[in-house]
Image: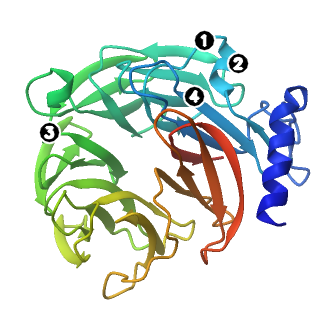
């Protein structure tokens, strides 16, 4: 379908709000009874305008081609909050870190009805789960703009009570997290290290030196950890870590650009990386021997995601004060369609 045609179709769907709660079920599954209206689809996190309660979740059903741009507010009759940073699904719940509101909103994964709030946080960023009862969240804490002092930290979350049970000091401005083999890997974006937390003792057991400003981490099919790093005014890089001995075994450097690395994700087969750097989207096989020099997509994406089933790429675009857009691409970089969401679409979760 042509881009303009489907863009117009999505506009019609947005205007016809009474038709947006379409549900679908998998006729091939043994139990065809849907668990809720939002069991399957794409959850698009919209950061919102900083300093205002305009954060939102947009929900897209690829099967029925329906879009709900204000899911949280529509279901719960209240705003999500100020500056949504990440959305993570754990068991039958969604956990939305809202950094300037200093909380994590908890919603039912299938109805999106509110199930509670985790308070007592300081600029929460990203969440990773050990299991359905215990998770971790990175917090900036020491971010100068916030007025807080000290280093960054990771808070341990009891998901049965929606409470913080312990805090763990890590490096400056901790960002992305990755859980692997009972260890939590934390990217300290304000420094040059990855903190490794033992989830049995909930203490930092080692630190890995990876270079300036590590931001996001993914695990590949060979159980190697990839880190996207890079500061401002210095070249970025992808660093591959072997978690068997926590050595930074390979670094793939980028040429110096006018803007640093942004987001990192991996395809469903876990053998191809996608990342943003210098205002473009790049792709790289995990077996490559050097970093790519040619961009896949020449768009400055604010958010990046990939559907693990179809390998469809999702790019979030837009300004800081007006509604943004999501553009979908084939893995080859060919545009499929686009549709409007809310302010600053910065993350995607596929169910």
The mark that comes first in sequence, 1 or 4, is 4
**Which element is circle 4 on?**
strand
Label 3, residues with CA under 10 Å away: few <14, some 14-19, many ≥20: many
Query: Is 63 placed above or below 66 here?
Result: below
Q: Residue at x 42, y 82 (%)?
A: 294
The numbered mark at residue 56 is 4
Report the residue marked by disc 2: 75
Q: Nearer the viewer, residue 229 or 1?
A: 1
Q: Residue at x 82, y 66 (%)?
A: 2
The mark that comes first in sequence, 2 or 3, is 2
**CA separation in Å, label 2 and label 4:** 12 Å
The numbered mark at residue 181 is none
Measured as percent of width and height from the top left, residue 10 is found at 80, 46
Report the residue marked by disc 1: 78
Residue 65 visible to the viewer: no
Report the residue marked by disc 3: 170
The mark that comes first in sequence, 1 or 3, is 1
Q: Residue at x 78, y 30 (%)?
A: 36
Q: Residue most toward the bottom?
A: 289
**Which element is circle 2 on?**
helix
Measured as percent of width and height from the top left, residue 56 is found at 57, 28
Q: Nearer the viewer, residue 69 or 246?
A: 69
Q: Point out the frontmost of discs 2 and 1.
A: 1
Q: Point out the frontmost of discs 3 and 4.
A: 4
Task: Quadrant for residue 4, please give it.
Answer: bottom right
**CA separation in Å, label 2 and label 3:** 37 Å
The mark that comes first in sequence, 3 or 4, is 4
Label 1, residues with CA under 10 Å away: few <14, some 14-19, many ≥20: few
Q: Residue most toward the top?
A: 77
Asked whether, in this view, residue 105 is left or right of residue 257, the answer is: right
């Amino acid at each position: 379908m042509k881009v303009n045609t489907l863009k117009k179709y999505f506009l019609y769907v947005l205007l016809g709000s009474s038709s947006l709660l379409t549900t679908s079920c998998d006729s091939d599954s043994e139990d065809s009874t849907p668990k809720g209206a939002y069991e399957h689809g794409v959850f698009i996190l919209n950061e919102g305008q900083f300093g205002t309660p305009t954060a939102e979740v947009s929900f897209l059903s690829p099967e029925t081609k329906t879009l709900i741009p204000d899911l949280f507010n529509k279901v719960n009759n209240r705003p999500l909050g100020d500056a949504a940073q990440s959305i993570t699904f754990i068991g039958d719940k969604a956990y939305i870190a809202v950094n300037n509101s200093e909380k994590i909103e908890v919603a039912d994964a299938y109805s999106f009805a509110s199930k509670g709030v985790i308070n007592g946080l300081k600029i929460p960023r990203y969440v990773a789960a050990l299991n359905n009862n215990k998770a971790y969240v990175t917090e900036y804490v020491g971010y100068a703009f916030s007025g807080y002092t000290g280093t960054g930290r990771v808070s341990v979350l009891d998901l049965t009570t929606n409470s913080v049970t312990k805090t763990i000091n890590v490096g400056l401005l901790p960002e992305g997290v990755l859980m692997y083999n009972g260890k939590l890997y934390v990217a300290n974006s304000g420094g040059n290290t990855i903190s490794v937390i033992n989830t049995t003792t909930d203490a930092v057991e080692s630190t890995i030196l990876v270079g300036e400003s590590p931001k996001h981490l993914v695990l590949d099919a060979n159980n190697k950890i990839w880190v996207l790093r890079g500061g401002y005014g210095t070249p970025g890089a992808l660093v591959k870590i072997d978690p068997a001995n926590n050595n930074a075994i390979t670094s793939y450097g980028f040429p110096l650009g006018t803007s640093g690395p942004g987001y990192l994700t991996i395809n469903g087969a876990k053998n191809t990386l996608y990342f943003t750097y210098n205002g473009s989207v790049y792709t790289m096989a995990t077996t490559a021997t050097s970093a790519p020099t040619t961009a896949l997509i020449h768009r400055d994406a604010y958010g990046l995601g990939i559907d693990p089933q179809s390998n469809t790429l999702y790019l979030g675009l837009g300004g800081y004060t007006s509604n943004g857009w999501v553009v979908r691409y084939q893995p080859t970089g060919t545009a499929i369609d686009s549709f409007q969401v809310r302010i600053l679409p910065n993350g995607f979760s596929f169910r």
